[in-house]
Amino acid sequence: AVTTVEGVGSTKTKLHPIQKRLANCHGSQCGFCTPGMVMSMYSLLRNHPEPTMEQITAALDGNLCRCTGYRPIIDSYRPFSAECCPMKGTGGCCLDKEGSISCSHEGDRMCSGLCKPEEIHYKDPTQDYIFPPELMRVAKQMQKKTLVFHGPRTTWISPASLWELLELKANYPNAPLVVGNTSMVLEMKMEGVYHPLILYPARIPELNAVCYTENGIVIGAACHLAQLREILITVVSEQPEEKTKVYRTLLKQLKTLAGEQIRSLASLGGHIVSRGSTWDLNPVLAVGKSILNLESTGGTLQIPLNDQFLTRMQNADLRPNEVIVSILIPFSQKDDFVSAFRQADRRKNALSVVNSGMRVLFKPNTDIIADMSIFYGGIGPTTVSARKSCQKLIGRHWNEQMLDDACRLIVGEIVLSPSAVGGKVEYRRTLLVSFLFRFYLEVLQELKKMYPSTFPDLPQNYMSAIGEFQVTPPQGVQVYQDVDPGQPPQDPVGRPIMHQSGIKHTTGEATYCDDMNPVDGELSMAVVTSTRAHAKIISIDVSEALKVPGVVDVVTARDIPGENGTEDERVYADHEVIYVGHIICGVVAETYEQAKKATEKVKIRYEDLEPILTIKDAIKHNSYFGEEKKVEKGNVEEAFKTANQIIEGEIHVGGQLHFYLETDSVFVIPRKEDQEMDVYVGTQYATAVQNTVALALNVPSSRIMCHTRRVGGAFGGKTTKPPFFAAAAAVAANKTGRPVRFILHRQDDMFIPGGRHPLLGKYKIGFMNDGRIIAADLEFYTNAGCTPDESVLVIEYVVLKSDNAYDIPNFRSRGRACKTNLPSNTAFRGFGFPQSGLTAETWIAAVASKTHLPHDKVREMNMYKGASATPYKQDFDASSLTRCWKECLEKSEYYSRKTASEEFNKQNYWKKKGIAIIPMKFSVGFYVTYYHQAAALVHIYLDGSVLVAHGGIELGQGINTKMLQIASHELKLPLSYLHLSETSTVTVPNAVVTAGSIGADVNGKAVQNACQILRKRLEPIIKENPQGKWEDWIQAAHQQSISLSATGFFKVYVTNMDWMKEEGNPFPYYVFGVACSEVEIDCLTGDHKNIRTDIVMDACFSINPAVDIGQIEGGFIQGLGLYTMEEIKFSPEGEQYTLGPDTYKIPAVCDVPEQLRIYLLPNTRNPMAIYSSKGMGEAGVFMGSTVFFAIRDAVAAVRKERGLSENFTLDSPLTIERIRMACADDFTAMIPKDKPGTYKPWAIDIE
């Protein structure tokens, strides 16, 4: 029996407390990840009714969310924990002194907490579905027999006995054994590898048995890793410590190996036999001298799990007819010391960059090495052994000289090519010896415990090298201003109202584009993309593709009846391809699998042309889009002459993929008459979709009806690309006369649409010795990719926003968008500011380092204050910026924590803390005035219910919720009367893009206008019957022939920018904010943990504090990913390597700060926006830079202690590799260095 989210609870039956809490505590935004979050928690509660918080966060290790920042999800599940609070079950909460979350009605009327006590639902055991008893009875009574399943490509056999399995393996030696299918499924999805026969041995008793022997434990090969963990926990609790060293080491690795979903599926035998280089258990099993028990029809055999097995040497490998039945993991000995290490791009649910298992056995009562073994993963195609080095160390004392010799031996034996797959070559070499050093210290510490009088104490400041980070589950604080006490309870404006679709998200009832039911005649589409970065198309041969069963047609540029996109960007490539991933043609078939298979049969002949891939190459070839953009104030050159000091530098800021969880999706349904077509699409810009499809089909736009109910995340990425995807599908539908569903596979969605622009920022800064900056000359280059898209606008915003929060009297900023043969980069949350803002903070940090002044003092003295003007001469009031700064200093306890951080750093050599506080001035909206218009349509029906439609699109940012709040307020109706369906070009034509953080501003004004029109029409009727009900008034209005439908419109913001004069008022208003983050770094590995973040944001009067705080938190975590871990990799030929969650890491639960505190600045007003609110959609991203600069602060402490230059620049993202290599030491010095230009790198730097 399989229980899905629909089975846990639904709106038609009853909601489970998990679902209620997640919705009520604002744990969903776009909602696409939410069913997975529900099921992870539901599964945990079924297995552990009162879990710890550590178990709750571990259960979510395998879940990703791109919207929320995870904090509200964790908080919503907190009451289910046994350790939550002593008032559990009372309906109260210990977080509040009265036992409930409350608002202070004095002073500023500030509220803390977004979830009301009455919304705290606890576990209801009566609602848990149990495994159906009738199935259990049937299973017991049913005779065990072999199961056979036949599919179109594969036959799946599940034998009932071991002997039957061995016979099948003898007859079909090439048939793979599959238990969890966690490895082979990747071959199928990513490489198209299918096997005609698959054997499933998971039901065989011998492969699931656990046997305890005097030598150790024997574990069946089909036991999954979660079972292995439980087995080892039991053994460790029952056996003496000296016998369980290997088991405890395995448990340590199991904590971070994959996510809980994978651990519950993947088998121990599969983990071993697949022998992946980065598999974390194999090095430990190898040093633990594990034995593999094999069987075949020819008999039984035991082989050691050693380096020969791991490297697949013929005499030590499995024969095709042999099966691993079980694994013996021996007990350890008294003088055994075993440990394991791993470092990954993300602490949890990520493959290791390098891992290791290490073991040393000493002669009794001595520190003389009797035996030693070290295995490394991540260094080659499989796990490797440092056998020769270990042999040379036998007989040596365990001392520093041995360590130094061991490091040099291993660096000489374990060789990593400079062109090695995966890159990070010098970093990976460094980890070899860093891990060994950590093992050396761990063993010394254990020897000291065993023989206290024989071995010296470890230096206290070296103790920090031992052990992993101690991470506690995240906790949050949210503080916002309460509504006026006189506001009617039914008026929702200003209150933390639940997301309009929150319950539907948690029950799985929210539908997205691909959830639409199949329709008659529907076809699925897959696309053929270019394998060249730049080439002419010589020919396209589709003959073999058309022969694939199920294929209906292949669509190319020649099938477009109208316009093939624009001059710059095509729907289908016609004569030339300009990047790897350029869509050449589409295959439509009865199923997606058939279409995908046929794409591999399409043959394209190319004539290669020279590509331009990097910013450096683009500058060299003068390859740009548009003209240089520049703003300037004062006299920069003269100011440089008077400056006490001048610094020059540059920073490279990497790009970022949107990684929205719902990939680009479109479903096109042609109508039977008038060339009409319904286009269901995930987009931010329905009007652009409508127009692009109409132009491609050569029909009026009025014939194309676009529909979007909700989008599973967008972040700017579904603005300019979906129109072309929709047009590609529409052309196919037009040609075949059948509906076409086009859902991009995750891999395709990673490299076709592009992402955030990589940037090179150059700066020259003149300043005085007291830290005052008097001149700044900035130069920016973005890697735009192969088409203009939004790149010229992005570079304009980079230039306009490059001052961040700093008032520099003499300021010049210039920028160019570089044209390259990479995927065309596009809009992304923040729209250029996250890159230029980081550049600004880099030169601020450089000035502080040069003057030896505290960084916060340099920032504060150069900040805008009071009445101010930007370099482009737009006036604004910076008072709220100053207030945010002061409040963040106070709320974050910056100075006391800075002192504590410095004290920690004095006491710890191998771990360091850092703290940073960063201000922000973020501009909202566009300088193109017509983007600041919106329309809405409001209908009142005779039963009194109200339907609201507007031109904005629900992307997860809560725009629909805010629109309903506004309508409720204006109509003076409870929310229960109001309904909002889809966004459609039929109801609201010509709607502008939902972007720029102003969606709620402009659409809210339009909804307000429509509601005010209706309320005004009803005023005479209400006046006649003031005691009447709403329904009575509506009936009366209808009987008096008063229109109960109104269109609202908004067009107030007037913005402009004159680039010739370098001045204007390009933005409606600014959002101010300040954030402070504290981190701790591991100097040996480059890992870091996020300790605490405080954010003070000037949201003015928040229409919905829950929505706005959610946007701030989600933006912050997305920014944290941008600045510290998300890294796009390209080959020297322009092929993108990062094509899925296995190679591209976004933040997970483990990356959330242990404390995340959000404060909305009270008592501020914004007359430009509805109800004096501000748009919070994008501002939070830049707040993630505080983590970057906190890490920089920690690295600076390392470098100062080691006598290294304190004037240094760190590029973004500040990955584990960059952190480690910046913390130079004896280990980084001893590894071999490769001279650039003497080898072909695996990946290139494109920024």
Image: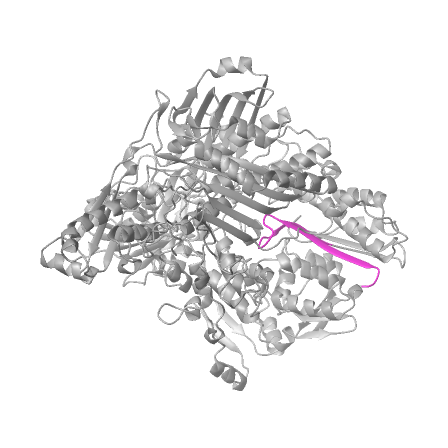
Image coords of residue 584 (percent x, y): 37, 44
Residue 205 lies, in percent from the top left, at: 62, 77
Say which of 438 and 665 sits in front: 438
**What residue span does the magenta drawing correspond to?**
333-357
Q: Is residue 355 magenta?
A: yes
Q: Is residue 192 visible?
A: no
Residue lying at the far left in this picture: please name it.
1040
Tell me if 772 is positioned left or right of 408 in this view: left
Say whether residue 161 is left or right of residue 1171: right
**Residue for point 39% across, 59% down:** 502
Q: In this rendering, is residue 816 above or below 44?
A: above
Depth order, front residue of 169/516: 516
Asked whether residue 565 appears in the rendered view, the answer is: yes
In the rendered view, tell whether residue 481 sits above or below residue 1040: above
Q: Quadrant of residue 1054?
A: top left
Give the farthest residue toward the front: 106
Q: Main secondary structure of the magenta part?
A: strand
Verify whether residue 351 appears in magenta: yes
The percent coordinates of residue 357 (x first, y second) are 72, 55
